[in-house]
Image (cartoon, helix red, strand yellow):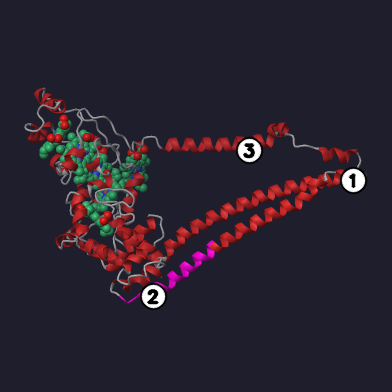
Amino acid sequence: MNSNRLRSLPHLLLAILLTLAGAQQATAQDASASTATVSKAGVTPGATAGATPATAVAPAAGGADAAAIQAGDALFKANCTQCHAINEQVVGPALGGISKRRPITWIIPWIKNSSKLIASGDEYAIAINNKFQKQQMPSFGLSDKEIISIVAYITSQEGQPAAAVAGGVTVQNAGSTDGKASDASADGAGAGKYVDILLIALVVVLIVMVVTLIIIGNLMKDVLRGRKDLDGRDNEILEQRFDWGKFYRSPVLRGIVGVVFALVLLYEGVQSVMAVGLTQGYQPTQPIAFSHKLHAGTNQINCVYCHTSVYKGKSANIPSANICMNCHSQIKTESPEIKKIYRAIERKQPVQWVRIHNLPDLAYFNHSQHTQVAGLQCQTCHGPIQNMEVVYQYSALTMGWCINCHRESPLNTKGNAYYDNLVKLHDTKNAGAPFTVSSNGGTECSKCHY
Ligand code: HEC
Ligand code: HEC
Ligand code: HEC
Ligand code: HEC
Ligand code: HEC
Ligand code: HEC
């Protein structure tokens, strides 16, 4: 019997146990450290409330944070998504990290009236306005509380602790900016971290257990081998080795591999069937290298200058060569690309633009309903066209896409007498519920199919 090995075993086990204990302690420390922050967060907003006008809403941002974020979500979708996304630039800048970039004392007046802030000579406001080619952001009649909830929502979406939001809220209480985490999202991010740590710890424990079992197994065998009173069969079992060949050929393994393979195949199959008829991202090469970035972006030509019927009719229409000639009879007349326009006019044939967006005939979509009546920006559906050299299909254009927006979007009823009675009726029947496109029948089949 191998006594050397026996003697070293307890040491090995001890070492493993010690490592385990060390890891657990580290995790526990981590956890207690962050509990401290969270409990601090619970206290501070209340403590600072009333110190400044802005903090009057801090209890809401601290206490009922999930509700605030939810309210912010709805407000953001209703007012801001036309021009802003959290993590990418649309018409306006990406808003992720805004609570770190700007204090809430700047964000509130900016959203209420950005032009006023620019006119007041605020350096940052002027700089960002210039950076976005002096496009003015509209003014919003939102309350401080609503704006704070929007910022809380934005911060929750960027997947970082919301400490910065609340920190911004109380800028006047200088020095006390840390720790005022708005709980829900801090908890969310924190919980995610602990799940990770827990998983890693579990895996480590599992590995240690397997290793320990193997060691114990070998140890037992060593002990047994030393005994004299074993018969042939016992010895056979003792000397049994794991037979990999048998394992590979075992029907159980083959069954499991087969089922996994079938599931993956099924999943991929369903995915590709679901994608049939989807043309999202479609970006054909056009006959003339016409750039929206150059025309609508750099040169700020209004969309409706070319897509003339987009506010009046069903179709947005593609400009004829005549519209190009308004400028190109003078501009870049020697460019080979521009000469293609001249050639089309000489031959009395339209430029053969390749159509990108195309709903099937069974669906009815009307631009004026969405641009003129609903007041949606082109970019909501078409993406950052003003940055595209070559246009591509930004949205999926599926029925689900239409319906989802109709479920979420409030109707734009302001100053539209057509809606006055409907709004009254809605308010008496479902007071408090938002008056969305779908509550006005916007998800009924016959609105889009007939
Ligand atoms: C019609 C388009 C449009 C809408 C709607 C809009 N914004 Fe903006 N926003 C802009 C533009 C453009 C800028 C860049 C500054 C400028 O050009 O004045 C901007 C800038 C900002 C900034 C400063 C960003 C930074 O990085 O410093 C914030 C904050 C902001 N918007 C928040 C909002 C919020 C919140 C809403 C919804 C309540 C909203 N915006 C709705 C167009 C819009
Ligand atoms: C100078 C004229 C001009 C201006 C300004 C212009 N466009 Fe276009 N647009 C065109 C032409 C020409 C095409 C067809 C060629 C192409 O797809 O690039 C087109 C194509 C498109 C398409 C794709 C149409 C399809 O086939 O499905 C969209 C969407 C679009 N424009 C949106 C916009 C938006 C939004 C703006 C404003 C931000 C804008 N355009 C400004 C001329 C213009
Ligand atoms: C309101 C004026 C205006 C209209 C309308 C207009 N363009 Fe332009 N276009 C410009 C300007 C400005 C430039 C940039 C010239 C420069 O870079 O010096 C330009 C550049 C171009 C270029 C790049 C030429 C090159 O070789 O650099 C192409 C191609 C072009 N336009 C195609 C069109 C087409 C096609 C239409 C009609 C659908 C059109 N443009 C309508 C103003 C216009
Ligand atoms: C609510 C979403 C939505 C908005 C907002 C929107 N579009 Fe469209 N657009 C579409 C859809 C959907 C199509 C495909 C229509 C079809 O195939 O019948 C389309 C098609 C187009 C086309 C191709 C020609 C046509 O009418 O089929 C152009 C050009 C266009 N849009 C320009 C614009 C411009 C410019 C604006 C802003 C003034 C705008 N769109 C706003 C959804 C939208
Ligand atoms: C980004 C949001 C958005 C998307 C995407 C969108 N819509 Fe709409 N749609 C609206 C809004 C908002 C209205 C309400 C306009 C109003 O105030 O009457 C509306 C109204 C309509 C109406 C008139 C409903 C009525 O009550 O008379 C039809 C029809 C319609 N949409 C069809 C479509 C189709 C088809 C698509 C997809 C191809 C689509 N919409 C995609 C926002 C959207
Ligand atoms: C807001 C507009 C809208 C409403 C409401 C709507 N649809 Fe659709 N539907 C569409 C659009 C757009 C398409 C085309 C989608 C595509 O091409 O992927 C479509 C496609 C379909 C298709 C698939 C046709 C095909 O050839 O693939 C069926 C079936 C359908 N709709 C049935 C319905 C029924 C039933 C209802 C009512 C419960 C309904 N739709 C309500 C917009 C709408």
Viewer-nearest of discs 3 and 1: 1
Query: Which residue is tagged 2?
Result: 46
Residue 148 picture location, percent across and down: 31, 65
Residue 269 picture location, percent across and down: 48, 35
Viewer-nearest of discs 2 and 3: 2
Amino acid type for the residue under numbered disc 3: Ile
Secondary structure of the magenta portion, mostly? helix
Amino acid type for the residue under numbered disc 2: Gly
Q: Nearer the viewer, residue 436 or 375?
A: 375
Query: Which residue is tagged 1?
Result: 227
- Taking the image in four quarters, ligand 1 sits in the one at bottom left
User: Looking at the image, which residue sits at the far left?
Assistant: 330
Could you tell me which secondary element the residue under label 3 belongs to?
A: helix
The span picked out in magenta is 30-51
Dot 1 or dot 2, earlier in sequence: 2
- Specify whether 210 is left or right of 370: right
Q: Residues within 10 Å of mark 1 (few under 14, many from 20)?
A: few
Could you tell me which secondary element the residue under label 1 belongs to?
A: loop
Counting labels gives 3
Q: Nearer the viewer, residue 41 or 292?
A: 41
Could you tell me which secondary element the residue under label 2 belongs to?
A: helix
Amino acid type for the residue under numbered disc 1: Arg
Magenta segment: does it hold 267? no
User: Looking at the image, which residue sits at the far top?
Assistant: 347
Query: Which residue is tagged 3?
Result: 256
Q: Nearer the viewer, residue 447 or 288?
A: 288
Residue 77 appears in the picture as rendered: yes
Dot 3 or dot 1, earlier in sequence: 1
The Cα atoms of the two marked residues, 3 and 1, are separated by 40 Å
